[in-house]
Amino acid sequence: MLVEGAVLDVDGPRPAYVRLRDGFVEEVGSPGSASSHGRERAVRGIVVPPPVNGHTHLGDAVSVREPPAGPVEELVAPPHGYKFRLLATAPRARKTAAMRLALRRMAREGVAAVVDFREEGRAGVDLLRAALRDQPVQGVVFGRPLRRPIEAEELRELLATADGIGLSSARDEAPEDRRAVARAAHDAGKRFGLHASEAVREAPESYLDPAPDLLVHLAKATADDLAAVRDAGVTVAVCPRSNALFGRQPDLEAMERTGLRLLIGTDNAMFHAPSVWSELQFAYAASRLVGRPASAAFLARAALVEPWRWLGQPGAARIAPGNPVRPLVLRLPPDDPAYQVVTRTTEQVIVRPRPGRSGPSP
Ligand SMILES: [Zn+2]
């Protein structure tokens, strides 16, 4: 397949043609200079690295009704919030099936990887691993220990299968527990993350001690807090739709100006479908609704580029021959790629390979 139009990747937007074979990049060049390959299928559009959903709780997908009204703490706070009662009473098979359905939806929307905070201890991690089996989505699974004070044996069990440990927040944990969890994760060569400054502002001295690999939300962070996070070299995942349900917004304009490394995630699957495209569209519009506009380029990087660097797979964020993951082809006008991708992408504009068919597309 030959795509004439533009590329949007780690090097930014540029006019280009891209030739794909079996979905992988074979050749990239200046527009109009592609040599003709006979009856090759040709489309006009934008080629991007596949997006990553930077923060989810897919286990919540077991919830199928509108969640009750109330503050976020009552809904999702461990161990007695609405969500945890739901998880505790849902049969394992139902939870796994709900997660598989969510993962299948993500795959159809072109998502190549998801960073999930899984509750329910080791058993919870095992359920998500079962749901991920044979799915084309790479799962980065942060588990959460159940016992307090923290027990070394439970952490060992958790870290045997999880990719890291994700805590609810610094203010929900004793400082010594937080440090023990971070140390255990890092000693095992794995990641440590936590939610921070979601409903109330927390001091960076708490959630940056020790420096996590991922912070989620920072909806209540001040400009100085954001600078401290940047200086600590910590990546942040924002979830604007989830925050909006509770009357909050991350200051995306300040995050961009500060130079934060950002991922974008869809948070609790009981609140929203795990669509990273919907999240991008909302982030673009909501940052304007509050008069703090973030650029489309910054938001696009949060979904398509920064996560691959964070995952230690920077090659996946570049549209070039030898790219280890298949890029996405979006049938969108290529004149202003980041703006088009952020504000207009849906499942319907993803160009799928047509096995067994050749010739130009209609
Ligand atoms: Zn979360």
Image (tube, grey):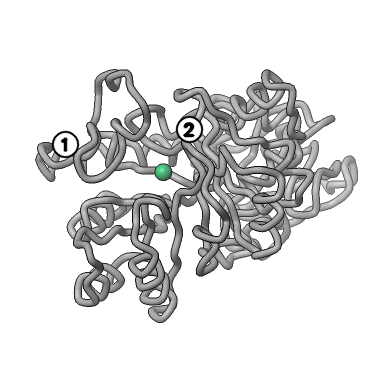
Ligand 1's quadrant: top left
Residue that numbered label 2 is attached to = 275
Quadrant for residue 179, please give it.
bottom left
Amino acid at pointer 2: Ser
Q: Earlier in the sequence, mark 2 or mark 1?
A: 1
Q: What residue do we see at 34% from left, 57% from top?
A: 173
Q: Residue at x 41, y 81 (%)?
A: 187
Q: Of 153 and 263, which appears nearest the observer? A: 153
Res 357 → quadrant: top right
Instruction: Quickly name the residue at label 1.
Output: 85
Q: Secondary structure at mark 1?
A: helix
> Can residue 164 be seen by looking at this rendering?
no
Q: Position of residue 287 (x, y in %)?
A: 68, 27
| Front-lying residue, 149 or 36 | 149
Q: Residue furthest bottom?
A: 187
Q: Nearer the viewer, residue 198 or 39?
A: 198
Identified at 68% across, 39% down, the residue is 299
* Quadrant of image for the N terminus: top right
